[in-house]
Amino acid sequence: MADDVETPATEAPEEAKQGEEGLTTSKPVEESVPTLKPAQDPLNTEFLYYSSALRILGPLVTQEADRKFIIPWIRKLFRPEYHSSKLKEKRNRYLAYLCCSVLLDQAVGVFKNFPPDGALVNCNELPTPPVHTVEWELDTYWQDTVFGLPDDFQMLECSVHNSEADCANDHQLDKILDHEFQFYLYLARPYAYLIKNGSDRTRAATWFQVLCSIHGPTSCSSMKAIRNDYMMALLGYLHDLRVVGPFAELPSWKTLPSLAEAAKAAAENNPITDPTGGEANEFLMNQPFPDDGAFCYIALTGDMVVKHLNPD
């Protein structure tokens, strides 16, 4: 599977000049124009990457039935004609598709059959293989939560725009944001069930309910993006089995500020340096206790420095 690297032809020497005495002389070396080094072809660089990936991943395909199709495809795409300038891009598209197939540890799509003897069809003409729905897409928790909201429930107000008339909806963007939210929600729920503290579980469930209420075509796309920011942050906290930061308090049923504003307000209201706060107590409880005597911790913040430097 060695690829044929095209090398530039050697420049022909300049025609010899006739000297005054009728002797044949060559042009001095210092007067020759230096040749520029040709720029590297990005398609060749891409090809080298796919070659390295297939060299490592190809032999690792589990099923022998898949390997018997993949190996002929590699041999086909490495043939000399696919190094020509007209076929490089098509070759790389097939190789990218083949790398994805190998990463899935199976032959998919066109690679389930032997390559044709003749020319390959364009990639955009290949049939799209069916993709089965995954488990998180079938989860109905979000729909059930929305269905269980009270009849008099009012949608949260948009915290980005001044009026409903200014709110905008992008159907394609909304679809992406909703899929993203459902995936994060699916990942977060099992961690919420593992939290031992009952009040923390209640707050997590309440946050789930509020975030799920931002839905449908009447909800602003900007609010859906804020909803996803909160859901992503909540997932990170739940992964550590704690509900802190902006989620230390119950959510508002009126609107949601941006996550940055909520995080700043939470840090001001419940600073980690507060000896009576939950974060400080949790930190102290995880520290080693001495057998005799006492110990103390001193917390320094940048606010003290700023206040001293700028007393006004």
Image (spheres, helix red, strand yellow):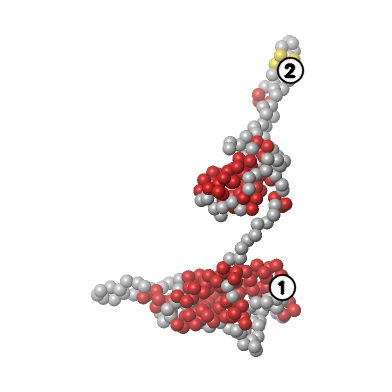
Q: Which mark is residue 17?
A: 2
Q: Determine whether, in the image, residue 99 is placed left or right of residue 298.
A: right
Amino acid bearing label 1: Asn
Q: Mark 1 highlights which residue?
A: 169
Q: How crowded is mark 2: few (under 14 residues within 10 Å), some or many (20 or more)?
A: few
Of callouts 1 and 2, the N-terminal one: 2
Q: How crowded is mark 1: few (under 14 residues within 10 Å), some or many (20 or more)?
A: some
Question: Which residue extends farthest top?
Answer: 21
Q: In the image shown, does 41 or 4 lie closer to the viewer?
A: 4
Residue at coordinates 63% horizontally, 48% vertically from top-left?
Answer: 113
State whether residue 124 is above or below residue 82.
Answer: below
Residue at coordinates 60% horizontally, 84% vertically from top-left?
Answer: 148
Residue at coordinates 43% horizontally, 80% vertically from top-left?
Answer: 197
Q: In the image shown, does 79 or 46 lie closer to the viewer?
A: 79
Question: Which residue extends farthest front?
Answer: 65
Q: Is mark 2 on a helix, strand or loop?
A: strand
The x, y position of residue 138, in whole percent, is 59, 71
The x, y position of residue 160, in whole percent, is 66, 76
Q: Badges 1 and 2: C-beta atoms under 8 Å apart?
A: no
Name the image quarter holding the N terminus.
top right
Name the image quarter holding the C terminus.
bottom right
Q: Is mark 1 on a helix, strand or loop?
A: loop
State whether residue 152 is above or below residue 297.
Answer: below
Amino acid bearing label 2: Lys
Q: How many labels does the image show?
A: 2
Question: Which residue extends farthest left?
Answer: 292
CA–CA distance in space, label 1 to label 2: 75 Å
